Image (cartoon, rainbow, N blue to C red):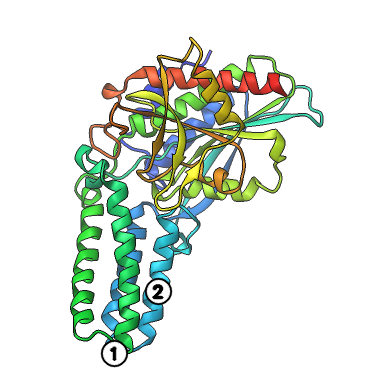
Amino acid sequence: MFSPHTFLQALCAFPHRGAATPAGAEAARLLQTQLADLGATVRTQAFTTPKTYATIVYWLTGGLLVGLALLPLTGVAVGFVWYFVAMAWFYFNWRYSFIIKFPAQHTAHNVIGHWPASQPDNNVQTVILMAHYDTAPVSLLYSPRQQAGFRASLILSLVLMLLAAMSATLEAVGIGLPYLTYLRYALMAYFILQAITGTLGYWLKGYTNGASDNATGVAAALATADRLRQANLPNLAVEVVLTSAEEAGMIGAYYYVEAHKRKWKRNRTVAINFDTLGAGLLTVIKKTGTLEPLRYANEPTRIARSLLKTDAFRDRTQTGEWHTADFDSVWFVRNDIPVLALCALDARGRMPRIHQPDDTLDAVEPTPMETAIDLAEAVVQRLMKDK
């Protein structure tokens, strides 16, 4: 029988699992071996991605700064500013943004294991169990004090980018001078400071070990798959999807959903996403999003929330929201595919130690991970019963 605790130790033995790094590739091989040992048909999905969000932040900030700097020389710079503001607006509201295609691009891999239904027919229910295996760069913005204000800081930056584009447009036609010129310089200084603050931790400390975020999620996805394959549910097909480059903007999950969404039967496909289960109380997510709300109002989430009221889960779980970045499940929500998002949050609604150097195995509390496995299995069992 698969042991999530033993596997957790093996996955955390890597110093990190950064996307498109040698350590990330070694971790992907371990995942392939484990899935094969569990009897899955294993494949990988290659895609190109920046290694970290630092590359994307530098492109967005650099493009915006170049446009603002060139404004006194050419009116074309206004369009340049608006272009980068639009890409930032999409990227930080967790929509597809072409900025993820900018150099430098590297190859990363999603690792996928599949167990077909033992008695396939037109009523096969497909359950996708997802977790990202890549680890995050260390970030000052995710410290305990900063994490609470992350969303507000992000919204402020987006609003100031929009202000920069609007004021640049007015300045280009000679309105509001010289005050808009002074504003442009002040905004340029702010954007430089934000880029430095957001990426300095990576250059000083590198990657986290990622024990909670998200080795726990990977272990939970594999353990749930192992339980379901032993449950003898003849019309159930299970797919485990372990994504990379989540920490660069949920990029691996984006490519997975884009490659498969046209093949899925919407009324016979659901997903469960496991992310950061190493501390706090298991949480069924109701809503995420930066400026645009993303609501989890779908069948697996409704089933999970009903199970939270039972004796088996009442004292072990909660519902909540998460607005500090987002989850791989965002692309399922965007495409109206039912998805249950599970994570662990503390009493203040935060994820302890994420994107910090102390996100290590010795700090992991196993209870949220164990509860996530129990809840995910119960949701699928109820789903199959209701079908």
Occupied quadrant, residue 154: bottom left
Counting the numbered discs, the total is 2
Q: Nearer the viewer, residue 234 or 38?
A: 234
Q: Quadrant of the C terminus?
A: top right
* Relative to 245, 212 lies left or right: left
Q: Is residue 98 above or below residue 139?
A: below
Q: Which residue lies at the image location 63% right of the left edge and 19% below the top edge?
A: 382
Q: Mark 1 or mark 2, which is nearer the start of the sequence?
A: 2
Q: Which residue lies at the image location 57% right of the left edge and 46% below the top edge?
A: 256
Q: Which residue lies at the image location 24% right of the left edge and 65% below the top edge?
A: 191
Occupied quadrant, residue 304: top right
Q: Mark 1 sits on what residue?
A: 174
Residue 82's tag is 2
Image spot of residue 106 (x, y percent):
44, 55
Q: Nearer the viewer, residue 261 or 27?
A: 261
Q: Which residue lies at the image location 57% right of the left edge and 18% below the top edge?
A: 378
Q: Is residue 44 above or below residue 126?
A: below
Q: Nearer the viewer, mark 2 or mark 1?
A: 1
- Under circle 2, the secondary element is helix
Q: Nearer the viewer, residue 224 or 158?
A: 158
* Relative to 212, 187 lies left or right: left
Look at the image and tell me whether residue 104 can be seen: no
Residue 28's tag is none
Look at the image and tell me whether residue 302 can be seen: yes
Occupied quadrant, residue 134: top left
Image spot of residue 38 (x, y percent):
58, 22
Label 1 sits on what residue type?
Answer: Gly
